Amino acid sequence: MEDRMRITFDRSLETGDAEIDGQHRELFNRIDQLLASSRERRSREEVEQMLTFLGDYVVHHFAAEERMMAQADYPALEVHRAEHVRFVHEFTLLYREFKAEGPTTLFIIRVGNRVTNWLREHIYRTDRTFVEHQKTRR
Ligand SMILES: [Fe+2]
């Protein structure tokens, strides 16, 4: 396959928390793998595996963040959690769309744009705010 846009975690997204940053890096890797398998028209089963692999990690990562926030008595926990819930909902819709139509071009565009833009914005604003709050407590 020809050159493609890679989905990468860039340093501007680092929050300064090693655990959170490591998980964000892994999320971007999994999105990149999903997009690679969709674009290269690999089998539907393989794309579905990648999608599930990504979805599982999203859930694991959000739970880890929420645990850290609960431990820190973070006052904005509920607002932050609501953003996670909305994302999981969007992801579920995307999964259903995939089940119905397979890895269409539209599906690839949506993963590439919507999912990554959401993540970037969420990390940049919401996650960083939490890590800043953590730093002031130490
Ligand atoms: Fe978050």
Image (cartoon, rainbow, N blue to C red):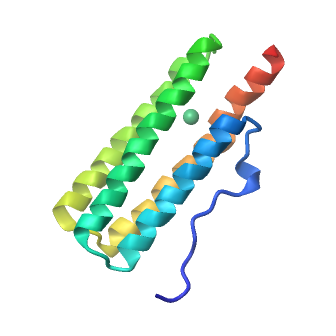
| Residue at the outermost top position | 73
5 and 54: which one is in front? 54
Q: Where is residue 97 shown, x and y percent of the image?
A: 24, 58
Q: Where is residue 125 shown, x and y percent of the image?
A: 67, 38
The residue sitting at 53% across, 50% down in the picture is 27
The residue sitting at 34% across, 66% down in the picture is 107
Residue 38 is left or right of residue 33, and the answer is left
Q: Where is residue 113 shown, x and y percent of the image?
A: 49, 62
Residue 48 is left or right of residue 54, and the answer is left
Is residue 113 among what the camera can see? Answer: no
The residue sitting at 79% across, 14% down in the picture is 137
Instruction: Report which quarter residue 122 is drawn in.
Output: top right
- In the picture, the quarter occupied by the C terminus is top right
Instruction: Report which quarter residue 68 is drawn in.
Output: top right
61 and 94: which one is in front? 61
Tell me which image quadrant ligand 1 sits in. Answer: top right
92 and 34: which one is in front? 34
Is residue 43 among what the camera can see? Answer: yes
126 and 37: which one is in front? 37
